[in-house]
Amino acid sequence: MTSTICGWLGATVVADAAGFTMSNTPMPPAWGDPDMSVLRLNRRPPPTLPLEVFGDVWGPWIIATAEAAGCPPDYVASPLLALVSTLIGHARWAQATPGWAEPPHLWICSVGDSGTGKSPGSDCLMGSVLPEIERRMLGDFPDRHRDWEAAAERAKASREAWEKDVRSAQKENAAAPLPPAPIPQEPQAPRLRQNDVTIEKVATLLATAAPKGLLIVRDEFAGWLSAMTAYNDAGRAFWIEAYGGRPYRVERQKHSMPIDIPRLAVAVYGGTQPEKLAGLFNDADDGLFSRVVWCWPEPLPFRLSRQAPNGQWAIDALDRLRLLELVLGLAPTDAGQPLMVPLDEQALPRLEDFGREMQERQQMAGGLMRSAYGKARGLALRLSLAIEMLWWCGVGGMTPPPARISGAAFLAAAHLVADYFMPGAERVYGDAAASDEDRHAATLARWIVRTRATEVHVRRVLREVRLPGMNKADAIHAAAAVMIEADWLRQPDASTGKRPRMAYPVNPRVLEAANEPVG
């Protein structure tokens, strides 16, 4: 009789010519549906960017530029907001009440795995638009610098002559002549962005070359955060202060005179990979991260674009913001003051409602999200000014800059904060809290899908595959335990002898559920 095998009450029943015999080997249970969120560390889904808040002109420009870069529109909108906040700078502050005003400067970080389009998304603005606007800022600076060189040489010659006269007077026991005027301070070329983020360099530029403020651009945002105290123990405190726009004094070891900054505020833009943020959130919350807004969309399928972004239009539009000037006083030494742009009366109750909603969310939140909600009111006020000015500069023409922030602009800003930036922060902070086991499980899951693996053989993964972070068998076993819970793997078969083969079978439904390989 031909043998047949069937399952019955978890045992294997074998029928043959001699009759029925029962094996002691239990049949494994049927595979369940795998939890595919393991691939993404059980990450919260990203919020959808509300493109309508950018208006009828900038919204389509963001979409077209993102299509040209082959990236999500989020990676274009984020550097746009950071650049707009810098161009407005201290020329305009958003004012809610006579006692509450905010500078417009924003700190924005684009988060995403390598190859998801962070850099291409910012290339048009950071690589083409910003350099051209900086070039226009130069104006007559080359002529002024030549005048300084001539004045500096004259001052140097006068000092050399004075030193000679002092020596002569000393020999003749006569009164020494008064010293000449000091060598004038070298003028700094006006600029918008800075990559060197040492405290003294940033302070010097804010006090001389960038009275409206600076945009700190960092390709690796996490590197900037982690290196704040590398050369100066006060570095982190300086950067926390660099958000509020208050007066600040930087003492210098090699110079007797400190650097006085009338309003310490900078904008910041950069990008990073989610894994690089994980280790930064372990320290006590000092308020630094609550100043950052996070942009982390899902990647798009790669495709080639046949169009170029309209960078020239953006240059001409944003250059209108560059022309906004500080309000100069009567004193020759006055560095200028911001012009306050108050909220329209109809926007004030909306701000109160929004503030109460953020307070309620804050009471329900913990950890870093609690601090993020605490900054939400100020963030919405800053964004409302940026949005109002963005709408204005995009229209063109000869209309004067807005003198008030409209209710529509504040509603757009509140929508962006409550429904985009706050959920984005939850996504980032939740991902950073993931354990090493969860991270390794996600790495292993992506390898399984990419290679269509049917088993995870521990020795092979160690010796041949060499996945990041899994250079020890214990790490692979710990990741496998997470994946067993998620119905991706099963325990290795232990019935093959004294030393079982350490290979975890892969659920066949995994490859069915994965529509395409995940890189």
Image (spheres, helix red, strand yellow):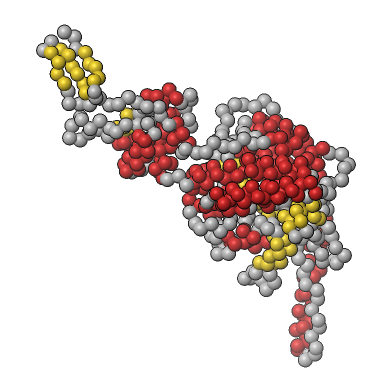
Task: Give the camera-side residue of 92 and 157.
Answer: 92
Question: Residue at horizontal 76%, vertical 47%?
Answer: 347
Q: Is residue 121 visible?
A: no
Residue 123 on image: x %, y % = 66, 39
Q: Is residue 26 visible?
A: yes
Q: Where residue 509 appears, x then y in whole percent?
A: 40, 24
Residue drawn at x 83%, y 49% as measured from the top left: 403
Residue 122 placed where, x, y %? Answer: 65, 40
Q: How many labels does the image show?
A: 0
Left or right side of 457 for 242: right
Query: Is residue 232 toward the left or the right of residue 452 in the image?
Result: right
Which residue ends up furthest to the bottom in the rendered image? Answer: 173
211 and 366: which is toward the camera: 366
Which residue is depicted at the point 68% across and 70% down?
258
Q: Looking at the image, is 34 positioned above or below residue 119?
A: above
Classify the position of the N terminus by image quarter: top left
